[in-house]
């Protein structure tokens, strides 16, 4: 057996023996194998995504077109009914070929139920509901992008339509183009409102991308995804008149609650007029869809800027991972959280705390998957985060309760951040008052006043001069928390030592005056400054993120109320501490300071984790911000270590005290 190859610039055939043929095949196999290894993971992801989109498109056809094939249990058109049977069977078959997932069995059961409903000629409304439910479930189980990554340009879509589509569909999309008469079946009348009200923009994008089998509608995969989305948006406006768009614009401007029905591009691309009519009345749904499809850019102002940044960074991180850049993907994932989601945390926690906790946990899990997971797992996690962020957009959408939410958000932020700093400062002031060292009290007051002044400067800088990145914010908070924790740990052990066996009396009589020198006074100034500034730093950045047009007074009211509560609490604590016997004061203060050290240690490690400096290993426990408890092994380990140091030190102090007592007796 020989392999015959003809060389182009030589008419004489060259013959290679079988061994060279085998070598040639081996070489080709090797090259193909290397190519497969290089692109294997992304190819598998792309194949799964492509199949999931095809299944979704089949189901969308059934949901939209079944009503033209069956009515009142009777087949209206045999060819269309046969097509419906073929589509549901194909969807069921392709689902069986998809990669195994936890929900795939449920999807197959839904597909069987849909096929049975079509076979029984069930009414169109019920079949459409079954098809929509299954298509949504497919998208969740096998996630794929359902919206453009950038705002579509409708003028570009119009140009593409005239160049690529008007010959068949007509200049106005009425199905009357120059080639329409020669086509069978006829081109779809895209301007027909009755049919178009059932179809979403994502469905149009899918048709434009893949075409329609059995028709002259070919896929336009040669166009960029950006161009295909622009074309889909333009086609989506054809069934609507200028009057519809004007009424939609008026509705959008005067009726703020409708903003909650469509909060982002993702929501808009998946929402048909028919689906929106279930939430609004028919005329309002028609007008709103007409306006938003023509002016999608208004959604960028309606949706949270933070969640929009988070979504964009998540998209970029997936692209970086598929390109083989895990380090870059990790940085972008961190930016999605720090620069996108974290600034809206306070507002979201006020409106929907369970959702806030879900998103935060999902962000941690996403970063872990980038480090150790497959591209398919990362894409699944990204799509889940997109869905959660869409829910966040809805929760953050303007509502009648905005003023109350702003007030509560400002109040809770100030109380949460200010309480720890207050306790540190009050403990120092109470100690100095007990020691009758009023000359050093001024240094503590100077420390917290300087911290507040620095916080004001930080607000001006962050708002008007430069942007403080999320990583810089977390690093500042993390290191300052750890510094304060180490100092408080030492102070707590020292105070406990002086509280046992009357040592405080000896200390006050012999050493206090010399110990509290200028060097120690400046140290107390530094501790007061760091303890307060770390809380002020986070608070002012949160307030800057919460501050929007129309909610200024509620925020200021929350701020004022919080300051009043903290001031009242400071007075109560100072008066209570002065009434305690000095031995009990030292004991209580040492315990309080040790607890604060444990709390700040947890917060410090959490801050460094969020900045990406320390790895995060999630653990299934609740998050308790007030106690510095975060669901990761690293934060808990450090807190346990600090607690262990406290317990050992306190135990040593107590044993020494007992020995001293025994010697004296």
Image: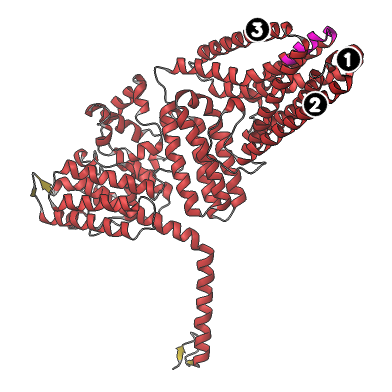
Residue 607 seen in the figure: yes
Q: Nearer the viewer, residue 526 or 491?
A: 491
- Judged left or right of residue 101, residue 27 is right
- For image coordinates 19% across by 45% down, the residue present is 127
How far apart, in angstroms, are the residues tagged by discs 1 and 3? 29 Å
Q: Position of residue 380 (x, y in %)?
A: 45, 48
Q: Nearer the viewer, residue 376 or 566?
A: 566
Q: Are marks 1 and 2 in contact (CB under 8 Å)?
A: no
Which of discs 1 and 3 lies nearer the camera? The answer is 1
- For image coordinates 47% across by 92% down, the residue present is 13
Check the picture and name the quadrant holding the C terminus.
Answer: top right
Q: Which is nearer the N-term, disc 1 or disc 3? A: 1
Q: Residue 421 lies in magenta, yes or no?
A: no
How far apart, in angstroms, are the residues tagged by discs 1 and 2? 16 Å
Q: Which residue is mark 3?
A: 572
Residue 207 seen in the figure: no
Q: Are marks 3 and 2 in contact (CB under 8 Å)?
A: no
Residue situated furthest front in the rendering: 665
Q: Position of residue 131 (x, y in %)?
A: 25, 46
Q: Which residue is mark 2?
A: 653
Q: Position of residue 594 (x, y in %)?
A: 71, 25
Q: Range of the magenta residues? A: 427-439
Q: Which residue is mark 1?
A: 506
Q: Nearer the viewer, residue 150 or 461?
A: 461
Q: Position of residue 10 (x, y in %)?
A: 50, 89
- Residue 603 occupies which quadrant of the picture? top right
- For image coordinates 37% across by 21% down, the residue present is 256
Q: Regarding mark 3 in the picture, which secondary structure is present there?
A: helix
Q: Main secondary structure of the magenta part?
A: helix
């Amino acid at each position: 057996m020989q392999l015959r190859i003809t060389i182009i610039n030589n008419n004489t055939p060259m013959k290679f023996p079988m061994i060279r043929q085998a070598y040639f095949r081996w070489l080709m196999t090797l090259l193909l194998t290397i190519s497969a290894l290089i692109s294997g993971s992304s190819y598998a992801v792309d194949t799964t995504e492509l199949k999931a989109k095809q299944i979704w498109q089949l189901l969308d056809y059934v949901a939209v077109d079944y009503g033209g094939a069956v009515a009142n249990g009777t087949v209206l058109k045999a060819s269309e009914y046969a097509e419906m049977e073929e589509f549901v069977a194909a969807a069921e078959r392709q689902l069986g070929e998809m990669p195994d997932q936890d929900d795939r069995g449920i999807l197959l059961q839904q597909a069987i139920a849909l096929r049975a409903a079509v076979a029984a000629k069930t009414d169109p409304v019920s079949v459409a509901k079954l098809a929509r439910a299954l298509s949504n479930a497919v998208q969740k189980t096998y996630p794929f992008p359902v919206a453009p990554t950038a705002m579509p340009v409708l003028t570009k879509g119009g140009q593409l339509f005239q160049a690529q589509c008007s010959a068949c569909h007509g200049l106005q999309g009425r199905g009357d183009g120059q080639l329409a008469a020669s086509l069978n079946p006829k081109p779809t009348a895209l301007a027909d409102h009755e049919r178009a009200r059932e179809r979403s923009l994502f469905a149009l994008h899918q048709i434009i991308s893949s075409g329609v089998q059995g028709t002259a509608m070919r896929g336009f995969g040669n166009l960029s995804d950006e161009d295909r989305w622009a074309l889909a948006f333009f086609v989506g406006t054809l069934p609507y008149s200028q009057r519809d768009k004007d009424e939609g614009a008026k509705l959008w401007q005067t009726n703020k609650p409708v903003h909650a029905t469509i909060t982002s591009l993702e929501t808009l691309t998946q929402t048909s007029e028919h689906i929106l009519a279930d939430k609004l009345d028919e005329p309002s749904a028609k007008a709103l869809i007409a306006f938003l499809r023509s002016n999608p850019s208004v959604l960028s102002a309606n949706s949270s800027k933070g969640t929009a940044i988070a979504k964009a960074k998540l998209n970029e991180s997936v692209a970086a991972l598929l390109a083989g850049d895990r380090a870059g993907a990790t940085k972008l994932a961190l930016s999605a959280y720090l620069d996108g989601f974290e600034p809206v945390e306070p507002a979201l926690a006020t409106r929907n705390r369970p959702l806030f906790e879900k998103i935060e946990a999902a962000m941690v899990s996403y970063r872990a998957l980038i480090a150790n997971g497959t591209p398919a797992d990362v894409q699944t996690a990204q799509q889940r985060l997109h869905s959660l962020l869409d829910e966040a957009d809805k929760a953050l959408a303007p509502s009648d309760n905005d003023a109350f939410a702003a007030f509560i958000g400002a109040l809770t932020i100030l109380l949460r951040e200010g309480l720890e700093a207050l306790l540190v400062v009050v403990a120092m002031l109470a100690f100095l008052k007990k020691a009758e060292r009023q000359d050093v009290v001024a240094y503590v007051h100077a420390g917290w006043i300087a911290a507040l002044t620095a916080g004001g400067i930080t607000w001006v800088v962050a708002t008007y001069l430069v942007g403080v990145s999320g990583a810089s914010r977390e690093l500042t908070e993390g290191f300052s928390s750890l510094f304060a924790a180490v100092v408080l740990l030492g102070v707590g052990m020292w105070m406990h030592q002086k509280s046992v066996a009357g040592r405080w009396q000896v200390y006050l009589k012999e050493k206090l005056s010399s110990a509290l020198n200028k060097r120690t006074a400046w140290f107390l100034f530094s501790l007061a400054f760091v303890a307060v500034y770390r809380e002020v730093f986070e608070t002012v950045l949160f307030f800057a993120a919460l501050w929007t047009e129309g909610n200024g007074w509620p925020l200021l009211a929350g701020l004022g109320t919080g300051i009043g509560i903290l001031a009242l609490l400071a007075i109560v604590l100072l008066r209570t501490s002065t009434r305690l016997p000095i031995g009990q004061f030292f004991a209580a203060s040492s315990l309080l300071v040790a607890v604060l050290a444990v709390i700040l240690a947890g917060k410090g490690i959490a801050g460094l984790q969020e900045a990406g400096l320390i790895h995060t290993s999630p653990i299934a426990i609740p998050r308790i911000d007030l106690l510095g408890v975060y669901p990761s092994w690293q934060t808990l380990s450090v807190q346990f270590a600090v607690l262990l140091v406290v317990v050992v030190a306190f135990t040593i102090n107590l044993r020494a005290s007992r020995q001293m007592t025994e010697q004296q007796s």
